Amino acid sequence: MDAELAQRLLKVLDRVEAWLPPEPASVDWSRDVAALWQRNALGGQLMPVAARDGVTMDDLVGVERQKTALLANTRAFLHGRPANHALLWGARGSGKSSLVRAMLNTLAPEGLRLIQVDRHDLVGLPGLVQRLRDAPQRFIVYCDDLSFEGHDDAYKALKSVLDGTLTGPPENVLLYATSNRRHLLPESLADNQDTRLVDGELHHGDAVEERISLSDRFGLWLAFHPFNQDTYLDACRHWVHHLGSEADWSEQARVEAVRFATLRGVRSGRAAWQFACQWVGAAQEDARS
C-alpha cells in the first residue's frame, strides 16, 4: 500500500510541476547590471532584469544640479571613496527615477550594479545587504517611490540598514531612494502637539523626531521641483527631436505643448515626454497617410 501511495503521489507531483513557473535565472554580475530583489519564505532571491531604456544624462533637462551631485556621489562610491546614501524627493514626474536609470546606463561600464527593492519587500533588506557584503562588485540598492503609512513597520528595516546596527551597511553598498515626500513617514497635526520650547529652543515630540530621523539617515538630499514654462518647453523640444526630427518642432508644436501641460495642470519632464510621444506619433501618422 505504501508503494502504491508513493507512486500516486509522484504522478500528482509530475502533473503539478508542469504548471509551475520556470525557475528564475540566477544573476551573473559579470553580465547583468541590474536585478530585482523579491522576498520569499526562504529569505529572498535576485532576478536579473534588462535595462528598461537607453535614457542618458543628456536626455534629462532642467535637473543639471541634481545630475552633477548624484554622479559625483556615485563615482566617489565606485572608486572606494566616502559617499552618502541619497534621497531624491520632490514633484511627481520631475525626473527622479529617470535620473537613477540614466546613472546606471552611464556608470554600468565603470562597475556600477543596481538592485531594485519594492517597498513591500524592505523587511528582507537586511538579508539582501548581508548577502552582498562579500561580493566584489559595488551595488546601489534602490527603492522607487518610497513612502510609509503610519502603521507600516517596514521603515524599521530601512533605518537598521542605513546606520542603525552595530556594523552598519557594508562598504560596497549604498542605498538610493526616490519619493514624493521629503519626510518618508506621514505627518499629522497631532504629531506637533508634543513640540515644546525649552529655554528658547524648539524641541520636537517623539513622533516628529521619528519621522525626521529616517530621512536624516540619507546624507545626500536632492530636491526636484515643478518645471517653469521655459524649462518644460526645452524638455518638450528635446524629446520631439529625440523621437522625430528637428523639423517636428515648430511654433505650432510649442503652442500645443503649452496647451497639453495646461490641460493636465502640470509641467514636468514626464509631461514633456508624453507630449512628444503624442505630437511626433501624430505627425508620423499624417506623413504615412
Image (spheres, grey):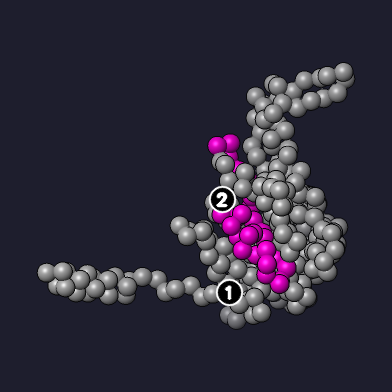
Question: In the rendering, at what x and y percent does residue 161 appear?
Answer: 67, 51
User: Mark 1 or mark 2: which comes first in sequence?
Assistant: 1
Question: In the rendering, at what x and y percent does residue 83 appear?
Answer: 82, 58
Which disc, if any, is residue 123? Answer: 2
Asked if residue 61 lies left or right of residue 264, the reply is right
Question: In the rendering, at what x and y percent does residue 207 appear?
Answer: 67, 30
Name the element at disc 2.
helix
First to last magenta residue range: 123-151
Quarter of the rendering containing residue 100: bottom right
Which disc, if any, is residue 107? Answer: none
Residue tagged 1:
27
Which kind of residue does numbered mark 2 sit on?
Answer: Val
Estimate the spatial distance between the alpha carbons at disc 1 and disc 2, rounded to whole Å.
21 Å
Residue 165 is one of the magenta-drawn residues: no
Which quadrant holds the C terminus? bottom right
Quarter of the rendering containing residue 193: top right
Residue at figure coordinates x 27%, y 71% from the top left? 13
Most extreme residue toward the right is 200
Asked if residue 16 lies left or right of residue 113, the reply is left
| Residue 123 visible from this viewpoint | yes
Above or below, 247 relative to 215: below
